[in-house]
Amino acid sequence: MDLVHLRPEARDLALLSVSERLAGAPANRWIGYTRANQAVALLEQLLEREPGRIRPRNLLIVGPTNNGKTAIAQHFLRGHLQHPSEKGEHEVVPVLLVQMPPAPTVSRVYAAILTGLGVPEGLHPRSPSREGGVLSLMRQVECRMLIIDELHNMLAATLPRQRELLNLLRYLGNELHIPLVCFGTRDAYLAVRTDDQLENRFEPFLLPIWEDGPEFGRLLASFEAVLPLRERSDLGLPAMRAMILQRSEGTIGEVAALLAAALETALLGGQERIDIAAVERASYQPPTVRRRTVERQLR
């Protein structure tokens, strides 16, 4: 059986039964499209060059919801996992990834950092000593980069509290001399822009909505290479690209969800490829349809 269109790890899966393939189909596999690879390369550069500088460069990766921001952060983190120090005296956490709390305060951000470093909640130092505890522990574990995901959650706070949170970002960078990398939506970028000093320190990196073209075709080819189908689907052809883009509304997370649904439609229908009919029939609703459905039910 010719399975050269698949990555090696997908070939064995493609030989299994339909039920086994649906159960084993990749859900969160890394898809290294050009913009994502550029973001990871920039993160590597910051980690290599910026720690220890008086004013290290920071990065703000901005994109719409469900467009691959967290996947980039998680992929980068997997390359820089916690490990023992050379003498085995303590753990080294080269990169710490935390999430901006949904109802954020300075104290809750410190708590998220402590939890990310493995400190049980019951052992978190009380305010006001929590600040010193965080800084001391960050230095002890030799942290070289702090990544804060979902930065736009900051906007759930009052305006004075948002100012406190922005000041906290600046303070952490100044005290630890490590780069800060934040991920968020356009709202996060607008919040950072309200602070001139932070705006100057945070370099924006955009993950825009996808548009039709060769790059989108390459993205779809990357997806096709991991879908356990025994025949080529040619997802990168113009008509297929247009259909997938229209239904998914242009974010990578929605593209993945649509293709997963189309894979199920194809396999349950006895097909070994995804064609336009499978994309059209897939049990999937794009974001705008889902929102309209909910809004109608709430009237």
Image: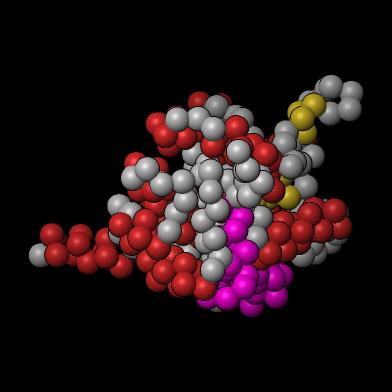
Residue 159 shows in the view: no
- Percent x, y of residue 75: 65, 47
Query: Total marks drawn?
Result: 0
| Residue 149, image x, y percentages | 56, 53
Which residue appears at 57% of the width and 68% of the height?
A: 216
Residue 253 is situated, as x and y percent measured from the top left of the image, at 47, 56
Q: Tell me where residue 22 sits by quadrant.
A: top left
181 is higher (above) or lower (below) than 109: below
Query: What span is colored magenta in the figure?
Result: 196-224
Q: Residue farthest to the left?
A: 299
Residue 221: in magenta span: yes
Q: Give the residue at the far top of this rendering.
A: 88
Is 4 inside the magenta-drawn segment?
no
For the N terminus, the image quarter is: top right
Instruction: Name the outermost residue toward the front.
Output: 1
Residue at 47%, 35% (x, y): give it.
Answer: 21
Left or right, residue 171 beside residue 297: right
Please state which of residues 45 and 53 is positioned toward the viewer in this rendering. 45
- 161 or 266: which is nearer to us? 266
Task: State left or right for residue 24 relative to residue 92.
Answer: left
Which of the colour schemes (rainbow, by chain, secondary structure, one colour) is used? secondary structure
Of 129 and 268, nearer the camera is 268
Q: Say if 288 sits above or below 228 in the image.
A: below
Q: At 66% across and 65% down in the image, what residue appears?
A: 35
Identify which residue is drawn at 80% across, 26% down: 84
Please tell me in which quadrant of the rendered image residue 83 appears.
top right
The answer, for residue 251, to whether it is visible in the render is yes
Task: State which quarter of the image contains the C terminus.
Answer: bottom left
Spot occupied by residue 250 in the image (x, y as percentages of width and height): 46, 68
- Placement of 292 over or under 213, stated as above or below: above
Left of 226 or right of it: where is 170?
A: right
